[in-house]
């Protein structure tokens, strides 16, 4: 007879954010803002020509 195998699950402490302040989410939002600002600066505000 075979033994019952316990299913592999993720521990509960890894499922949610540790606190109300989530550093990973803050870095993700900062990266999105940086991409939007740099793309807008290149195409809309013509920043490469303003610097040279």
Image (cartoon, rainbow, N blue to C red):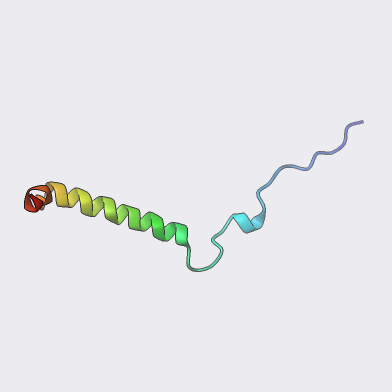
| Residue at far top of view | 1
Find residue 35 and report its horizontal and vertical position in percent: 27, 50
What's the residue at 36%, 57% (across, down)? 29
Find residue 5 and report its horizontal and vertical position in percent: 80, 39
Task: Judge left or right: residue 33 versus residue 44.
Answer: right
What's the residue at 84%, 39% (across, down)? 4
Q: Please state, as top left, top right, bottom left or bottom right, where the N terminus lies in the image.
A: top right
| Residue at far bottom of view | 20
Find residue 33 and report its horizontal and vertical position in percent: 29, 56
Find residue 39 and report its horizontal and vertical position in percent: 20, 48
From the viewer's side, name the closer residue of 1 and 24: 24
Task: Judge left or right: residue 4 versus residue 37.
Answer: right
| Residue at far right of view | 1
Image position of 1 with respect to 9: above or below:
above
Image position of 13 with respect to 42: above or below:
below
Image position of 5 with respect to 44: above or below:
above
What's the residue at 63%, 58% (across, down)? 13
């Amino acid at each position: 007879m075979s033994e019952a195998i316990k299913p592999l699950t993720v521990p509960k402490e890894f499922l949610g954010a540790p606190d109300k302040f989530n550093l990973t989410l803050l870095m993700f939002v900062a990266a999105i803002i940086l991409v939007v600002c740099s793309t807008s600066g290149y195409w809309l505000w013509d920043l490469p020509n303003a610097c040279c």
